[in-house]
Amino acid sequence: MRPIDQRADAVRAFNRFYTRRIGALDDAHLGSEFSLGEMRILYELSHGDSLTASAIGETLGLDRGYLSRTLRSFKKRGLIATERGTDRRTTLLQLTPAGHKAFAPLERRAREAVVHMLEPLPAAVQQRLVASMDAIRSALGDPVAKLDRAEPFVLRAPRPGDLGWIVHRHGVLYAEEFDYDERFEALVAKVVAGLVEKWDAARDRCWIAERNGEIVGSIFVVAASKRVAKLRLLLVEPTARGLGLGRRLVDEVIRFSKRAGYKRIELWTQSELKAARKIYKAADFHLVGEEQHSLFGKPLTAETWALDL
C-alpha cells in the first residue's frame, strides 16, 4: 500500500472515531431536539450579525437544499426572523429572542461536554490535543486557525531533556519535510554535543520557545571566533509557524551577539529551506557562499549567510 493510502486510511479512521465520540451521527445532538448540523447553523446565527443564507452555507460548507429546508423550519418554529438588506436583493437572517433562548442552554451544554471530555486528561495531554487540532485546521487551509494560533509564546533557557528534544525534532521534521536521512540527525547530535563541550555562558546562548506549555522552537548562537558568532539549529514546529517565532528567535541571536561584542554572525543552511532563508534575508543576512554536497542522502546546495553587526 502506498504511504498516501495509509495516511488516507488513518484520516478516515480518525474521522469515524471523532464523529462517534462527539455524537455527530445522532439524530439529536447533546440530548436536544436539534441535529449537529442544525446546531452549527444556530451557532453561526448566534455569533453573527444579520447573516445571509449564502454566507452561512459557505462558512459551514452545507448543501444548499439542506440549508434552505433547515432555515424554513427554523422560521416556522419562530427561531429566526428575516429582513431585506439595504440593496433589497439580499435577505438577512437573525435569531429571534425565542431562538436565543433555545440556543443558549445548548451552547452551554456543548461546552460542558467538551470540558467533560478533556478533564480526565493531564494538562500536557490537553495542550498537545488542542495543538494537534490547531495544526490540522491550519494545514487544511482554515483561515480562522491562523487567527486562533496568534497566542503569545515565551523564550527561555534550556532545561534537562531539551537538547535531546532538539536532536529528535530535527531528525523527525527534516525527514518528513525534506526527506533527509539519518545522517542529518547524526550531524545535529554531533553539533549539539560539540556546543555543550565548548560552552561559554558569556559568549554562547540557546533559546527554547514554548507555547501553551509545549516546546515549539529553538535556536543557538555560539562563538566561531572572537569576532564571529555562528547561528545554529533554528527550528520552528509546524504548529507555531506563521506567528513570527522564527524571526523572533533570529532577532534574539542578533541582539545577544551585539551585546557579546561579536562583529559578524554566520550561518550554514540549504538552498531548499525557503522559509528559513526568507527569515535570514528579512534580518539583513546576505548570501556569501555556496557548495554542492550529498551529506543527507540527496543532492543539496549548502549556503553560507552572514550579517555584519
Image (cartoon, rainbow, N blue to C red):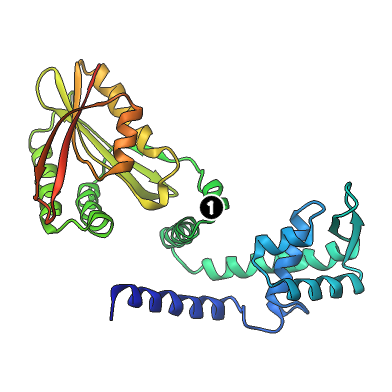
Q: Is residue 294 above or below residue 129?
A: above
Direction from residue 106 to residue 306 in the image, left or right: left
Which quadrant holds residue 44? bottom right
Direction from residue 246 to residue 163 in the image, left or right: left
Which quadrant holds residue 260? top left
Tell me the SS state at disc 1. helix
Mark 1 neighbour density, 10 Å: few (under 14) some (14–19) many (20 or more): some
Q: Quadrant of the C terminus?
A: top left
Query: Image point 33% across, 42% down: which residue?
Result: 275
Q: Is residue 208 visible?
A: no
Q: Is residue 175 visible?
A: yes
Q: Which residue is mark 1?
A: 145
Could you say where residue 200 lies in the image, as x and y percent from the top left? 14, 28
Q: Quadrant of the N terminus?
A: bottom left
Direction from residue 237 to residue 33 in the image, left or right: right
Q: Is residue 271 above or below residue 167?
A: above
Query: Image point 86% across, 73% down: which residue?
Result: 72
Could you say where residue 112 lies in the image, as x and y percent from the top left? 65, 67
Q: Nearer the viewer, residue 62 or 218?
A: 62
Could you say where residue 164 lies in the image, as x and y percent from the top left? 20, 51
Q: Is residue 107 above or below residue 158?
A: below
Residue type indicated by callout 1: Ala
Q: Nearer the viewer, residue 308 or 109?
A: 308
Query: Image point 56% across, 46% down: which residue?
Result: 147
Query: Image point 72% across, 80% down: which residue?
Result: 31
Could you say where residue 188 lies in the image, as x and y percent from the top left? 14, 47
Q: Nearer the viewer, residue 208 or 6?
A: 6
Q: How many marks?
A: 1
